[in-house]
């Protein structure tokens, strides 16, 4: 007889710590929630969740396979023993664990005739720390990535290495033969947006219960890019299901961000010498460095240190002027030392923010930052519009979707009408009953009182030079979250902006940090993170070298990533390569 999937109520929670328990009313997460009003009374203390207790695998991977076959609604493909020398992180072996590969909801679509299922894997350590980590993956999903629960650039540790049971999925579709064509199927859209994560949560708990003969004490959800979006959506839709949410570079307005990147592609095309084949001819690597150097010249010292990093991003936006500070060529000849007047006119709106045909902004601005010269910029700025954003918008975000037959991404990217696309990402019809802006975004991104009032926590990090999802979009959200919580949300949610960092990693930045451990300490020990210590990945870094680290930096430079709105400022003495020489100040 099949064993049913357990609900959250069967999970044995670790005890609350009585010294800090406040008697609170658990409220819904809608935007009309009175607890989200600035005038609402703020509790003197939020509940402190207790620490997870370690456990061990009950039996071995072979016996686990027999147990899992009794679970209902899932099909187990394999349960394998993964030896300790198979996976490494930061040059160290990940401990022996079981890998479960499985699927649920196999079906054939009545819309496009294709086969669908939610495919996933779980990695289950034999020495378990009592925690579950739900890994949100990036892009358009479609692949079951290795379930490690990593965060930060070139990580030296991750959730699996720390003993978490970790789940990873394809969000309900496969990436082949066409990465975005799954959007023709309306249910696949919904699974990608939010339903796969909700369906997999009780399944993961059932597998953990079978593996360790007890539920997980604590549950965490995390990811970067679309994985950050998955996490923000989970926080809004499933506030009672997870205790900690680790949100990296969240594309929580992803359909709008994709249309904005098409807008930016069209701006670059105005000055590209061969727009149909190579948008990067709009501004070369040398010319991007001219912009980056101009930003450094104006803004580097604003934090008290001339060190190749702009820590005080807000002050920089006030100090730097595109037209004045970027050198202008005397004519139309481009020699890599300046931008032509045409280039400056075409590219300026890419920083100031995408606008519709009437000039109204529909997505955030992008800050001036030296990371604009980073090696990760071209893929997002010049390649993504025709290869990622065009197909995502055309097949997955538009209602109705285009046909994949004969689709030309370049033609779509360079010629699509932005106003029409903005209408289509909010449209519905009888087949596609939820718009992209409904199924892809958190229904009430600032209505997180249910999460807050049960003691759960959220940590958000975002690269200042992220070229696809703007750090300003995330900062605007965080300001609104604070306003919805009496002017301060830092008792349950904190934002960490990473100067110089591109999309999730890279750029001239200190992008290597362990946010997983910091989140656990906050959730389970009440240690709110004032900053994260981040390292540059120079030559010899065990997590992988970042090619954008300047040669003038120490290969292991460290910096504090401060909880916004504080900024890392130089104390006036000490090494410019040592985090201890800096402090977080307003």
Image (cartoon, rainbow, N blue to C red):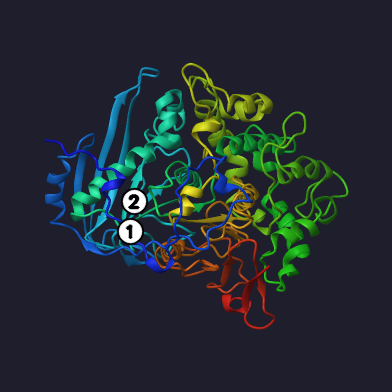
Residue 90 visible in the snapshot: yes
Please provide percent x and percent y for residue 151: 45, 57
Residue 56 occupies quadrant:
bottom left
Please provide percent x and percent y for residue 163: 30, 62
Please provide percent x and percent y for residue 247: 49, 52
**Nearer to the camera, 57 or 478:** 478
Q: Is residue 155 above or below residue 481?
A: below
User: Do the CB atoms of the residues marked 1 and 2 lie less than 8 Å apart?
Assistant: yes
Q: Residue at x 56, y 29 (%)?
A: 409
The CA distance from mark 1 to mark 2 is: 8 Å
Q: Residue furthest right?
A: 330
* Number of marks drawn: 2
**Nearer to the camera, 417 or 216:** 216
Residue that numbered label 2 is attached to: 147
User: Around disc 1, counting alpha carbons within 10 Å, would you say few (fewer than 14), some (14 to 19), or many (20 or more)?
Assistant: many
Q: Which quarter of the figure is the N terminus placed in? A: top left
In the figure, is residue 143 to the left or right of 100? right
């Amino acid at each position: 007889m099949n064993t049913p999937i357990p609900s959250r109520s069967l999970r044995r929670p670790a005890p609350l710590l009585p010294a800090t328990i406040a008697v609170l009313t658990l409220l819904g997460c809608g935007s009309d929630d009175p607890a989200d009003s600035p005038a609402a009374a703020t509790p003197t203390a939020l509940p402190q969740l207790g620490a997870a207790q370690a456990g061990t695998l009950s039996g071995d991977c072979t016996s686990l396979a027999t147990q899992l076959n009794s679970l209902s609604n899932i099909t187990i493909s394999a349960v394998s023993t993964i030896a300790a020398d198979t996976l490494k992180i930061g040059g160290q072996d990940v401990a022996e664990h079981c890998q479960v590969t499985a699927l649920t909801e196999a079906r054939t679509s009545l819309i496009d005739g294709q086969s669908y299922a939610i495919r996933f894997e779980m990695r289950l350590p034999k020495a378990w720390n009592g925690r579950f980590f739900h890994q949100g993956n990036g892009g358009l999903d479609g692949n079951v990535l290795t379930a490690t629960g990593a965060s930060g650039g070139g990580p030296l540790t991750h959730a699996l290495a720390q003993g978490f049971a970790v789940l990873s999925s394809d969000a309900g579709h496969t990436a082949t033969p066409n990465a975005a064509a799954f959007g023709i199927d309306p249910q696949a859209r919904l699974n990608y947006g939010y339903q796969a994560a909700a369906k997999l949560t009780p399944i993961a708990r059932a597998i953990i219960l079978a593996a360790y003969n007890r539920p997980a004490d604590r549950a965490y959800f995390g990811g970067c890019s679309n994985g950050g979006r998955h996490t923000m959506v989970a926080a809004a839709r499933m506030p009672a299901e997870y205790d900690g949410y680790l949100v990296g570079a969240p594309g929580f307005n992803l359909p709008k961000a994709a249309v904005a990147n098409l807008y930016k592609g069209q701006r670059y095309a105005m000055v590209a010498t061969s727009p149909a084949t190579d948008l990067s001819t709009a501004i070369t690597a040398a010319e991007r460095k001219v912009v980056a150097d101009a930003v450094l010249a104006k803004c580097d010292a604003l934090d008290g240190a001339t060190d190749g990093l702009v820590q005080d991003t807000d002050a920089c936006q006030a100090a730097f002027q595109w037209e004045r500070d970027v050198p202008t060529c005397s004519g139309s000849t481009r020699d890599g030392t300046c931008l032509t007047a045409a280039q400056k006119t075409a590219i300026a709106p890419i920083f100031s923010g995408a606008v519709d045909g009437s000039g109204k902004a529909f997505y955030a601005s992008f800050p001036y930052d030296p990371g604009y010269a980073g090696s990760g910029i071209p893929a997002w700025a010049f390649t993504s519009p025709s290869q990622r954003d065009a197909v995502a918008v055309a097949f997955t975000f538009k209602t109705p979707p285009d046909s994949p037959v004969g689709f030309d991404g370049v033609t779509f990217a360079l010629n699509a009408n932005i106003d029409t696309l903005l209408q289509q990402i909010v449209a519905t019809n009888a087949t596609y009953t939820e718009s992209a802006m409904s199924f892809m975004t958190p229904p009430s991104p600032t209505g997180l009182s249910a999460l807050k009032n049960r003691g759960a926590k959220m940590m958000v990090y975002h690269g200042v030079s992220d070229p696809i999802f703007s750090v300003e979009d995330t900062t605007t959200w965080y300001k609104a979250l604070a306003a919805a919580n009496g002017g301060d949300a830092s008792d349950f949610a904190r934002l960490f902006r990473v100067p110089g960092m591109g999309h999730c990693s890279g750029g001239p930045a200190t992008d290597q940090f362990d946010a997983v451990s910091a989140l656990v300490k906050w959730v389970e020990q009440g240690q709110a993170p004032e900053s994260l210590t981040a390292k540059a990945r120079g030559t010899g870094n065990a997590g992988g070298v970042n090619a954008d680290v300047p040669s003038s930096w120490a290969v292991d430079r460290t910096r504090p990533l401060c909880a916004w709105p504080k900024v890392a400022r130089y104390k006036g003495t000490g090494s410019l390569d040592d985090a201890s020489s800096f402090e977080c100040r307003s």
